[in-house]
Image (tube, rainbow, N blue to C red):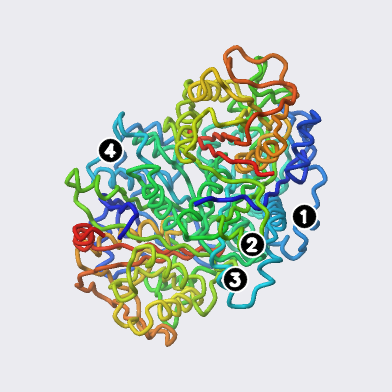
Amino acid sequence: MRVLVTGSGAICGAGASPAAIVDAAIAGRSAIAEVASFDASGWPRRLAAEVTDYNAAKLVGDRKLLKLIRRSDVFGIYACGEALAQAGYDAHRQSLDEAAQADFAEQTGCYVGSGGGAFNVNYDYFPLMAEARGDMGAFGRELASTVNPMWLLRTLPNNVLCHVGIRHGLKGPNGCITNHTTSGMLAAIEGAEAIRDGEADRVVSAGHDAPIEPQTMLYYHRCGLLAASALRPFDARRDGSLLGEGAAALVLESEASAAARGAQPVGEYLGGGVACEGEGLLNLREDGDGAARAIEAALADAGLRAGDVGLIVAHGNGTPLSDRSEGAALRRVFGASMPPVTAFKWATGHPLAASGILDVTLGLEAARRRLAPGIATLESPDPACAGVSVARETRAVASDVVLVVCRGFGGTNAAVLLRALA
Amino acid sequence: MNDKRRVAITGVGVVTPAGNDVESMWARLNSARSCGAPITTFDASGFSTRIAAEVRGADALPLTGDRKLLKFGNRSHRFALVAAEQAMADAGVAPTARDRHRWGCVVGTGMMTVSFDELASVQANAAPEGELDAAKVLDEATSNDPMAFCRSQSTAGVSLLTKRFGIAGYASSVHTACASGGQAIGTALRAIRRGAVDRALAGGFDSMVSPVGLAGFCLLSAVSADNDAPERASRPFDATRNGFLLGEGAGFVVLEEWGAAVARGARIYAELAGDGNSLSSYRITDSHPSGDGPIQAMQRALRDAGAAPSDVDYLNAHGTSTPMNDRSEAAAAAVVFGADVGNVAVSSTKSVMGHLIAAAGAVEAVVCALAIQRSSLPPNANLRDVDPDCAHLDIVRDAPRERRVRVALSNSLGFGGSNSCLAFRHPDDTRALVEAGR
């Protein structure tokens, strides 16, 4: 069964739509800058890609809802809304009679990749803890008068799933994946599988995260993962990644459903693959075995050969080992005939749970333009990543098939293949 | 003709308030004595709810493998390692260098990513007056401890498990609140069916028995405040129920493609026959009183299993003992089973072990596998005055009931509106279907 993409949406520091973000990348603009959301002036690492013109009420268009959600959720709900609007979802649903609407809702699923708990969600307890000064009796007694009664509901990792469901009337199969960086891409894969299974006729798949906060920044630095001055994927001088934030979403739809409602597809989901390395939370294999197996599984799932791929969107997070091992994986699969490789994190930062599906929306947009956007921070490609065909300049690509790779903590790897439709 | 790969449950493991292994838990469930008791793991004296169902002897849990792994884990990860170890040993199969890529691991994880002690350290040093001072985070001990970071990650649990057992295929963590455990097992079922892997370790783990976890539920008045009668606090389907009893723990199953399990002569508890999954899209904490949402999850599970409502002999209810959940779930059962509703035996094992949140669906999947294997249904404790809205249910009361189970269903209904229903079939019935070419 063919699974089509009938809508996509995205937001991050580099723009508020896939087209705007790809425009920024092609123009060589990165959203990475000194952190503004907290005072990081004395910090060893001060850079991240924040959404600087953040206006929650404007992004979700519902002030009451803001009491029940957090920054990451705002991005997720916005991206889903954009993707559904492009797909003409609400307009179509509202054109149906009541019985048909109910059936339509039950055949529409929702899969969301979420960052899970950030550190700052617990800071709502700090005033109470300061007051109680270690006295747990006082902590319990003063709880109800000090902490927002909605605290738990505002903190649910599955909030985007819940509120997108309520807002758009989605009642079909669903999931919330909290699997670090691969969360959003797994949401796309599981959503596509729900359609292939016949459990849903269409799904919205999304990923969202907002990890730019003091504790997370410092922890990433202490683990040696953050760059000093720029995120340079596959560059000889690369020294780390940098955090981003935001969300992306796709509407995936069976060919029959898209045809029945006259939806205009922008792409086709061809296949996906998932593999882990099982060597612990922070460990990665030098040979990129997990990434290579995820790509091979995606190719097999799509019934394609490596030579069919026109554009590769690499994970390219800028840390020395991740890029080196990803390069090894790409060489293993593509050998000497590697199509153009790009990566977007130098421009968008690394929005963790959102990153894989954000790269899917950007890769699809780039493939529709038949372009591999250049990597503006690339100065001298690392000889250890030889064969990975990255470039500073934007290049033309020869086929409409794009491969997107995503890697995360725990040695988890995912890959998807899509075909751009004009 | 069934064109789906069938999936067998060949190993089970649990760490629960009712016991830290399968046999202890089964005996306690059948005793119909609830595990509700005053909280001992922290001073809850000031809380409106001061009771919970705690895992006993967590520090003495028999851990095998590399103990250094524990530095990467918190209390719930310890539960996960122990329960998973039991399930893998029970199944008697493990990944080898040759087939580790064909093993998956899917877990339902809790939302409590930071321990209270770690939070208290950050507060005392970086937010002494209640507001975080980012500059002070730079010198704060916890915030500079990479191990604290590792324990807090959403993939901490799945990383520990895949490393411990050498699993190298599909690996994922899911969180849909109280539906997490069921959705994790359903996700693994689908990964095996589509051929992404042939075997999987799947389950859930959680511990919200902590100051911040309990606080979240107290603020919502979701937990029973029957502090003077903790053993009576969890009473699903009773007219006087007033909230759930917070539990903690982990449950795991080993899933195998049916043919692979049969080929190696594995003992099969049950066929994991169906996964039903729906979104209520009604309110954050409740499903509709009509049962809308849970109804679709149960119907989808039956359809996925190729079973009819009249094939179902046992429903392990979500049955949290909150006023709205039990009413909505009872209404859903009435719609799904129709005239047959009186023929379906129902119990909520949360009456004994409390609500294990992200682990609940996984432990209750183990309960269903045992009920099928042993032709015995665990009772619903603490039921005295049946809620008139639930009176149409045939609730197994006070003592276990002997009954051969053809199909069992397990419901897990989460905050946020995600509903999971898993369907299990008696392995003899599956063998007959397979022999008949179906």
* Local crowd size for mark 4, using a 10 Å CA cut-off: few (<14), some (14–19), many (≥20): some
Q: Which mark is residue A163?
A: 2
Q: Chain of mark 1?
A: A
In the image, taking residue A406 as reference, residue B298 lies left or right, namely left
Q: CA distance from mark 2 to mark 4?
A: 40 Å
Pick the front one: B97 or A43: B97
Q: Do marks 2 and 4 share a subunit?
A: no
Q: Which residue is mark 3?
A: B282
The alpha-carbon separation of the residues under discs 4 and 1 comes to 49 Å
Count neighbours of disc 1 (C-alpha within 10 A) and say few if under 14, some if 14 to 19, many if 20 or more: some
Q: Earlier in the sequence, mark 1 or mark 2?
A: 1
User: Image quarter for residue B145?
Assistant: top right
Residue A159 visible? The answer is: yes
Vertical comparison of A97 with B52: above or below: below
Other-residue count near label 2 (Cα within 10 Å), few / some / many at <14 / 14–19 / ≥20: many
> In x, y percent, where is residue B211?
53, 55
Q: Amino acid at mark 2?
A: His
Q: Amino acid at mark 4?
A: Ala
Number of labelled discs? Answer: 4
Q: In the figure, is residue B13 to the left or right of B68?
A: left
Is A378 placed left or right of B57 in the picture? right
The chain that hosts pointer 4 is B
The answer for how far apart the CA atoms under marks 3 and 4 are is 43 Å
Q: Which residue is mark 1?
A: A59
Rendered residue at 70%/49% (across/down): A9
Residue labelled with disc 4: B94
In the picture as drawn, the residue positioned furthest to the left comes out as B265
Residue A93 horizontal/vertical position (percent) = 66, 68
Q: CA distance from mark 3 to mark 1?
A: 22 Å
Q: CA distance from mark 1 to mark 2?
A: 14 Å
